[in-house]
Amino acid sequence: MKLNRRQTIQSLAGGGLILPGLISDLMAAGENPLAPRRPHFEPKAKRVIFMFMTGGVSHMDTFDPKPYLNQNHNKKTGKGNRFYKGADWAFRRHGQSGTEVSDLFPHIGGMMDDICVIRSMKNINGDHFGATIGIHTGSATFKRPSIGSWVSYGLGTDNANLPSFMVIAPGLPYAGGQVWGSDFLPVLHQGTRIIPGAEPISNMHRRTAMAEMQEAELGLLQFFNRQHLKGRESDQHLRARIKSFETAYGMQAEAPEAFDLTRETDATHRLYGLKRGDTEGFGWQCMVARRLAERGVRFIELIDGDTRIDYNWDTHANMSNYNKLARNVDQPIAGLLKDLKSRGMLEDTLVVFATEFGRGPYQPAPGVTGRGHHARAFSCWLAGARVKGGMVHGASDEVGFDVAEDLVTVHDFQATILHLLGIDHERLTYRHAGRNFRLTDVHGNVVRPILA
């Protein structure tokens, strides 16, 4: 049997004939780090749109109804000086599935037959920083590559003119750029941040008057880069930096068109609740995400909110802020699902709605209008990529304090996302600091009951 270069290196490594520290460098040398790679098995999803709600969305006010809390609102719990706090919004059943969703999300509620809600999520940390990097990187304490970077590393890209991992983030979330960082993976796999506005990516348009002049300049630069690379072919970071310049050049040709929403119809703008010409709001983020998905971007993250307390879901003081926050994302998210479905893209696009944790069911005194952090139980949901729509997986207890059925950890969540992309989370590894690392560390099980 004839082995290719990658298989030969893996075989020698397995036999102990290559020092472990050299494996990653040898694997990287001579290859395009963004070239498309075959998944471990047949994938359900070709791409991911990962929507992250910064601040911790209250599960019992959105996707996990708790009648017991409502019935005992403002009553003492019998566990210290704590009182029950009921939901501020009513819940209604939606679709043929009858999944209950609060009145905060009437548009998303209309799509519940395409959505699988996981009501038994648990994070590994209860502060914003640790929980945010936990759901993104699998570690709540150490800097690690984000899930988008792992997907880029594992699968590469189908479009050499656009980054494989792009993040639309008007503001910085808790943990900042670590949310889309590549850490020890080659830098080319880190997320490219897009800031909504007239120029979503800096230097997106060429500075020279003539394309021929820019080509000549870049050709000379590429020549000197290749000369510098000679004798340093195993330096994957140098190769990645050179490749990033080539990707940037391709982006000047393709990115302006990708962000040009004037090509979209009035009907499509209405679907997302976006006024023509607007570049702010979650509607813009969702419409651009669909356009990037169409153009081969592998992993697209949409971040709602930043670290300012009135501009994210961290409602310690006033739950009524949810009215404004939900209104910003509800119609755009439902519009995205409808748009993908009408174009036949929902079948192979995984759409994820996530947050770092939920909110607590108790309050220190009657009449308190906010909720504290709560990582022991919360809700996220998935749609598309042949995930079972119209179902609820797992359950929290009667007050939403602990997981009661079918615990799903952040590592299980990550393993399931990778599985839908055709990746075995135990086999997607990278050699660093003397050992193999993976997104899920030494944890994680695929949540198979939600898979069609």
Image (cartoon, helix red, strand yellow):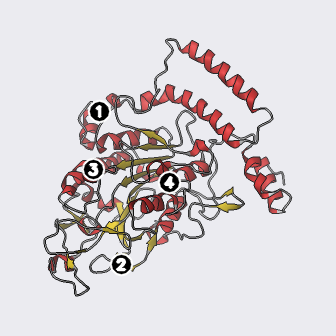
Please give left or right for residue 173 compared with residue 64 in the image.
right
* Residue 161 placement (x, y as % from top left): 55, 32
Q: Secondary structure at mark 2?
A: loop
Extreme residue toward the bottom, this view: 78
Which quadrant is the N terminus positioned in?
Answer: bottom right
Residue type highlighted by circle 3: Tyr
- Residue carrying label 3: 311
Disc 1/disc 4 C-alpha distance (Å)? 27 Å
Q: Quadrant of residue 443?
A: bottom right
Q: Evaluate if marks 3 and 1 touch, with contact meaning CB atoms under 8 Å apart.
A: no
Q: Which mark is residue 265?
A: 1
Q: Which mark is residue 177?
A: none
Disc 3/disc 1 C-alpha distance (Å)? 30 Å
Please tell me which residue is depicted at 37% across the width and 63% down the height of the picture: 380
* Residue 251 placement (x, y as % from top left): 51, 30
CA neighbours of label 4 inside 10 A, class few (<14), some (14 to 19), many (20+): many
Please give left or right for residue 293 compared with residue 239 in the image.
left
Q: Evaluate if marks 2 and 3 touch, with contact meaning CB atoms under 8 Å apart.
A: no
Q: From this viewpoint, is residue 172 visible?
A: yes
Q: Evaluate if marks 2 and 4 touch, with contact meaning CB atoms under 8 Å apart.
A: no
Lower sequence index among marks 2 and 1: 1
Q: Secondary structure at mark 1?
A: loop
Q: Secondary structure at mark 4?
A: loop
